[in-house]
Amino acid sequence: MQIKDHLREEQAFLGRAIIAGLLVILSLGLLLARLAQLQIVEHDHFTTLSKDNRVKLIPLPPTRGLVYDRKGVLLAQNRPAYSLELVPEQVKDIDATLQRLRQYIPISEDDLERFQRLKQRKRRFDSVPIRVNLDLEEAARFAVVRHLFPGVDIKAQLLRHYTSGTAAAHVLGYVGRISKKDLESIDPSNYAGTSHIGKTGLEKSYEALLHGAVGVQQVEVNSVGRIVRVLEETPPLPGQDLHLNLDIDLQKIALEALGDHNGAVVAIDPRTGGVLVLASKPGYDPNLFVEGVSSKAYKALREDRDRPLYDRALRGQYPPGSTVKPFIGLAGLETGTIRYDTSIYCPGYYQLLGHEHKYRDWKKWGHGPVDLDKAITQSCDVYYYKLAHDMGIDAMSGFLAQFGFGQRTGIDLTGESRGILPSREWKRRTKRQPWYPGETVIAGIGQGYFLTTPLQLATATAAIANNGHLMTPHVVAYLEDRQSHARSPIPPNQKTIPIHEQADWDDVRTAMSHVVKGLHGTAKRIRTDFYAIAGKTGTAQVFSVGQEEEYEAENASKKNRDHALFIAYAPIEDPQIAIAVVVENGGHGGSAAAPVARKVMDAYLLPRLYGDAADGLVDRKGGGTSS
C-alpha cells in the first residue's frame, strides 16, 4: 500500500494557487490599464464617437433662385414634387425590389433606364431616384407598404419647371442632375444635399448666384437612426433671383412671326445693351432634361434635321450678305476711300482688271449711276465690289472689327460663336494660304468667308443707332436678394468706336432710313406712319451659282434657297430697339425677314409711343422684293 505525500501535495497546490493568483492580478491589472486608457487617455476620442452615433449633421440644400422676365413674368420656378428613391447599399437584391415595387407604383422602362444610369454615377450610399413626380395617391400607396422595402423611401423636393416651354429654352437653358464631371468644378461641401446644377443657358452662366449656400442641421438620432430632435440649425442661404431684360411676350411674337421657317431674332435696347429678344427656332422643351431625358427622346432631338437643340441666335453663323453694306460704306467714308456723293456706274456686273470673271449684281441690268445713298437704299452689289477692292481687305476688316465682327460680344451666356471676319492674316493663320483679290470683292457684299451671328449683327446695328457706342449685350437686368429684396443692377458696359467725321455716320443712317421710307428702298413695304425705321435687307447664298447660270428660288429645294436677313433700329430720332432677323432659306430679306422685324418693333414700340391707343392703330405690315 502506497502512502500519500501530503507535504508534497500541499506544496504543489500552493504553487498552483500562487500562479493562478498572479494570473488573476495580471488580468485585473490589464483590465484596469485598459479602462484607464479608455476613460482617461482616449476619453475625448470615444466621447466624439459616441456623440457621432447620437448626433448627425444633415445638409440643408438652398432654394434655387427664380427667373423673371422684364415684366415680372415667372419663367423658371421651383415646384414641390415627390420622388421614389433607393439607397443601393441598403438593398440586398435591387432587381427583385424594383419588380416588387412595380406592383404598387407604375415604373416604366424609361424610369428603370434612368435609374440604372444614375446608379452608375453615384456612390452606393447615395440615394438614387426610381420614379420622379409621383402624385399624392402614388405617394400614399407606397407609404402603406414602406416597411416591406428597406432602403426605399419617398422624398419631397423642389424641382425646376420652365413655364414658357420652348419659347425661351435656349436662353434659360436647364438644370440637370449633378454628374461626376460637375463635381470636378464645384465645391462638394456647398452642394451637399443638392441634386441638380445648371447645365446650359442662364442656369449655367449664373449657377453660383442661383444656387445659394448650403445650410446644416444638427439632429439627435436613436439607435435605428431615426431623428429624435433638432439640436441646432444653420439655415441655408437661398439663391438670388434673376430679373431679365428679356420680354417673353415679345419673344413669342418673334417666334410666331418666323412662321414655318427656322431662324433667329435678336432685339437689343441700344441705350443699355439689354437683350429684349433672343429667339431661336425651332426650340425644345427644357423640362425634359430636369430629371434626365430618355435615350429615345434625346436621340430624336439629336437626329432632328431642324436641330432644335442648336441655338441659332447665339451660335448660328451666317453670311451677313447685304446687311453688312452700311458698315462697309461707313468704312469707305471714314478711311477716305469714297465720299458720300462718289458715283460709279453699275452695268449689272463688276470685273477685276485683267480678269474675265464677272461678279454679278442682284439686278441683272444694273442700277446705272450709283452713289452711297443709292447703293445702300437699293442694295447695289457692284458699288460694293468696287469699294471693297479699292479699300482693300486689311483696311476693311480692321474697321469692321471695331463693331465686334469676328469676336464674341461678351453676352452673359455661354457657348457664343465668334463668327469669321476674313482678313489676310486670318486666312494665312487658318488655311495657310495667300489672300486673293477676288476674295476681297465678295467680302464687300458679306459673302465668301464672312460669317456673323444674329447676336453680332444686332449688337453692331445698335452701335450705329447709338452713334458709335458699342454696348455689351446682357440678358440679366438685375439680381434680387430673396431675403432682403435688395437689387443689384448689371451695369452697362460699352466701348466707343472712334468717329472722325460725324457727318459720315449721319449719312449712313440717312441711307438706312431710305431703305424703308424711300420709293425704291428694298424694305419699303414695312414702312409705317407711326414711327420711323432705319434698316438694311440682306440675302445670303446657301450655294454658289455658275457664271452663266441664274438663281431661281422657285426651282430650288427649300434647303438650298437663300437665307433672308434684315437689320434695323427705331425710332430713328430716339432709337429704343435694334434688331437682327435671319430667316433660314427664306429668300429675300425684304419679303421674308423685314416683316418679322416690323412685327417685333410694333409690339415693343407702339405701347411705349401711344400708350393705350396702341391697340387701335392700323397694322400696315408688308414685305420687300429684293436683297
Image (tube, rainbow, N blue to C red):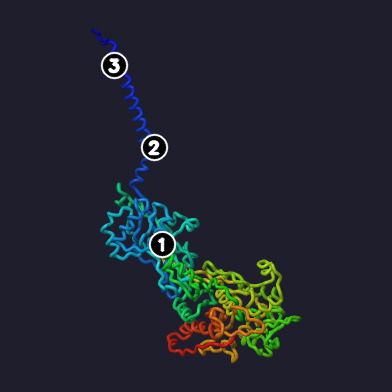
Asked if 318 appears above or below 1 in the picture, the reply is below
Q: Nearer the viewer, residue 462 or 346?
A: 346
Q: Is residue 58 left or right of residue 338?
A: left
Residue at (66%, 78%) from the top-left corner?
A: 442
The image quarter in which residue 368 lies? bottom right
Q: Which residue is mark 1?
A: 238
Residue 382 in view, yes or no: yes
In contact (CB < 8 Å): disc 3 and disc 2: no
Q: Which residue is mark 3?
A: 13
Mark 2 or 1, nearer chain start: 2
In contact (CB < 8 Å): disc 2 and disc 1: no
Neighbours of disc 2 within 10 Å: few (<14), some (14-19), many (20+): few
Q: Which residue is mark 2?
A: 42
Asked if 584 appears above or below 19 in the picture, the reply is below
Residue farthest to the bottom, as pictured: 519
Where disc 1 sits, the SS reads: loop
The amino acid type of the residue labelled 2 equals Glu
Residue at (45%, 89%) from the top-left corner?
A: 617
Q: Is residue 211 left or right of residue 155?
A: right
